[in-house]
């Protein structure tokens, strides 16, 4: 059994593989590492290897490693962003400062499709571009839907919004105005960047959509894209296979 763990800003996702048999899951972690690691299924009989891509920070990575070691009996291997690896070259002056989730997603995109645009709709919404030769061109980081909504409600005392769906249209209640407005803002930003990058890259290059908020945004996109919900886990599994 091999275990792959993707630790994001708000959620921990995992995949356990034994040959063609795969079990995977995930949940919000709230930085309660021991509790969350204990929910990982399929590894109670031990693991051959454990690979982790984490943006939780150095101190949390130590706690995650301890929890995984107790759970699996194996010393976890952490993979971090590199200056140059798997055909992709970073544009960051300090490559390790690039979130490893973004780096692994770019590696997977380039290995599978060549040039591509990666849109990660998570707690933060990120857009990254890699060209056909593997050069990371740069990216954007803006607040995701949940963060935008939270900031609006926190700083606007008279706005009270219940959970609800959103669409690209005028709202007919305060809740609809908030949900629809945030959706339109996010969709407009992503669309503008994608159209701009497709003039720099090939206009048929892949646009990969991932992240927990992707289902809330995808139906409103007016461009072709491929939804890859487990892009980071896919990339981490590819990297681990080569490193081993």
Image: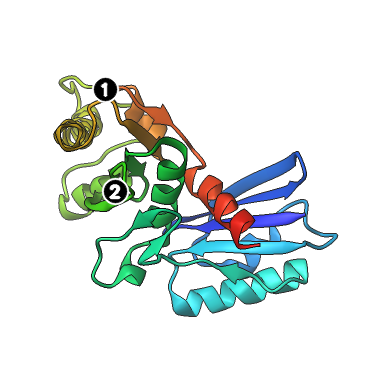
Q: CA distance from mark 2 to mark 1?
A: 17 Å
Q: Earlier in the sequence, mark 2 or mark 1?
A: 2
Question: Could you say which is closer to the camera, residue 40 or residue 171?
Answer: 40
Could you tell whether 113 is left or right of 239 in the image? left
The colour scheme applied to this rendered structure is rainbow
Q: Residues within 10 Å of mark 2 (few under 14, many from 20)?
A: many
Could you tell whether 91 is left or right of 19 in the image? left
The residue indicated by pointer 1 is 223
Above or below: residue 70 compared with residue 145: below
| Residue in the image at 20% along x and 25% along y | 173
Please tell me whether mark 1 sits on a helix, a strand or a loop: loop
Q: Is residue 118 visible?
A: yes
Q: Is residue 164 visible?
A: no
Could you tell whether 195 is left or right of 35 in the image? left
Residue 228: percent from the left, percent from the top? 47, 35
Question: Could you say which is closer to the camera, residue 180 or residue 89?
Answer: 89
The residue indicated by pointer 2 is 126
Q: Quadrant of the N terminus?
A: bottom right
Please tell me whether mark 2 sits on a helix, a strand or a loop: strand
Q: Quadrant of the C terminus?
A: bottom right
Residue sitting farthest toward the front: 133
Above or below: residue 201 compared with residue 167: below
Residue 115: percent from the left, percent from the top? 32, 39
Could you tell whether 112 is left or right of 20 in the image? left
Q: Residues within 10 Å of mark 1 (few under 14, many from 20)?
A: few
């Amino acid at each position: 059994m091999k275990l792959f763990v993707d630790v994001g800003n708000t959620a921990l996702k995992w995949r356990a593989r034994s040959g063609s048999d795969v079990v995977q899951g995930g949940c919000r972690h709230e930085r309660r590492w021991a509790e969350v690691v204990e929910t990982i299924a399929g590894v109670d009989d031990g693991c051959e290897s454990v690979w982790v891509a984490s943006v939780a920070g150095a101190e949390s990575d130590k706690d995650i490693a301890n929890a995984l070691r107790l759970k699996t009996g194996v010393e976890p291997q952490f993979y971090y962003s590199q200056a140059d690896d798997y055909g992709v070259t970073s544009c960051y002056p300090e490559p390790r400062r690039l979130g490893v989730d973004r780096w692994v997603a770019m590696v997977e995109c380039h290995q599978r499709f060549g040039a591509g645009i990666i849109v990660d709709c998570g707690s933060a919404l990120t857009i990254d571009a890699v060209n056909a030769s593997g050069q990371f061109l740069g990216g954007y980081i803006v607040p995701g839907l949940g963060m935008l909504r939270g900031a609006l409600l926190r700083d606007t005392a008279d706005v009270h919004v219940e959970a609800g769906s959103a669409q690209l249209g005028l709202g007919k209640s305060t809740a609809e105005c908030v949900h629809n407005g945030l959706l339109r803002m996010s969709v407009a930003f992503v669309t503008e960047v994608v159209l701009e990058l497709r003039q720099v890259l090939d206009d048929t290059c892949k646009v990969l959509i991932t992240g927990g908020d992707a289902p809330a945004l995808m139906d409103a996109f007016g461009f072709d894209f491929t939804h890859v919900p487990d892009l980071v886990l896919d990339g981490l599994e590819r990297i681990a296979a080569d490193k081993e």
